[in-house]
Every structure is written in structure tokens, then in C-alpha cells.
Image (tube, grey):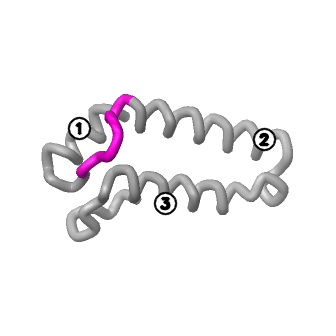
Amino acid sequence: YIKVLEKGVEAGEFRPLQPLSTIATFLINVTDGILLETHLAGKEEADTEGQLDALKLYLKTVLQINEQGVSMI
């Protein structure tokens, strides 16, 4: 994840508010948690889509995404 984020910074697509290692670790932890909860409770009960939307909002905010050049999120 860090290499992907670094490429986004180099291309001027991201202006991160936190260290890339922190963002990458948080991304891994959150996705692991969402997957585990979805597996245990089911997609509806876990509100998987809502949690993924929240993760996207976090990433857009913390990376300060330049929307004109990015289509991955």
C-alpha cells in the first residue's frame, strides 16, 4: 500500500495529512476488521457498505485527493 500511496504523492494526486505508513497500517486494520465482522455477522448486520463508504471518506480526507486526476477511490 505504501508504494501505491507514494506514487500518488509523486504524481501530485495525494497530499497526505499523516505519514503514509500510518495511513497504510490504518487501511489494513480497518479492512481486516470489516472483513472479519462481515464474515461473522453478515453483510447486512455489519453494514459493510456503510463502513466501506466511511473508509473512502477517511482516505479522501487524509490523502487530500486531487479529484481531477484520480479514479481509484
> In the shown orientation, is residue 19 left or right of residue 22?
left
Q: Is residue 1 magenta?
A: no
Q: Is residue 44 above or below residue 18?
A: below
Q: Residues within 10 Å of mark 2 (few under 14, many from 20)?
A: few
Q: Residue at x 59, y 55 (%)?
A: 52
Q: Of residues 52 and 64, which is closer to you in this image?
A: 64
Q: Residues within 10 Å of mark 1 (few under 14, many from 20)?
A: some
Q: Amino acid at mark 3?
A: Leu
Residue that carries the numbered disc 3 in the rendered image: 57
Q: Position of residue 26 (x, y in %)?
A: 50, 36
Total labels: the figure holds 3
Residue that carries the numbered disc 2 in the rendered image: 39
Q: Position of residue 16 (x, y in %)?
A: 29, 46
Q: Residues within 10 Å of mark 3 (few under 14, many from 20)?
A: few
Q: Is residue 18 magenta?
A: yes
Question: Which region of the structure is painted magenta?
Answer: 15-21
Q: Residue at x 48, y 60 (%)?
A: 57
Name the front one of labels 1 and 3.
Answer: 3
Q: Secondary structure at mark 2?
A: helix
Residue that carries the numbered disc 1 in the rendered image: 6
Q: Secondary structure at mark 1?
A: helix
Report the Cα–Cα distance between label 1 and label 3: 19 Å
Name the front one of labels 2 and 1.
Answer: 1
Residue contact at pointers 1 and 3, CB within 8 angstroms: no
Residue contact at pointers 2 and 1, CB within 8 angstroms: no
Report the Cα–Cα distance between label 3 and label 2: 23 Å
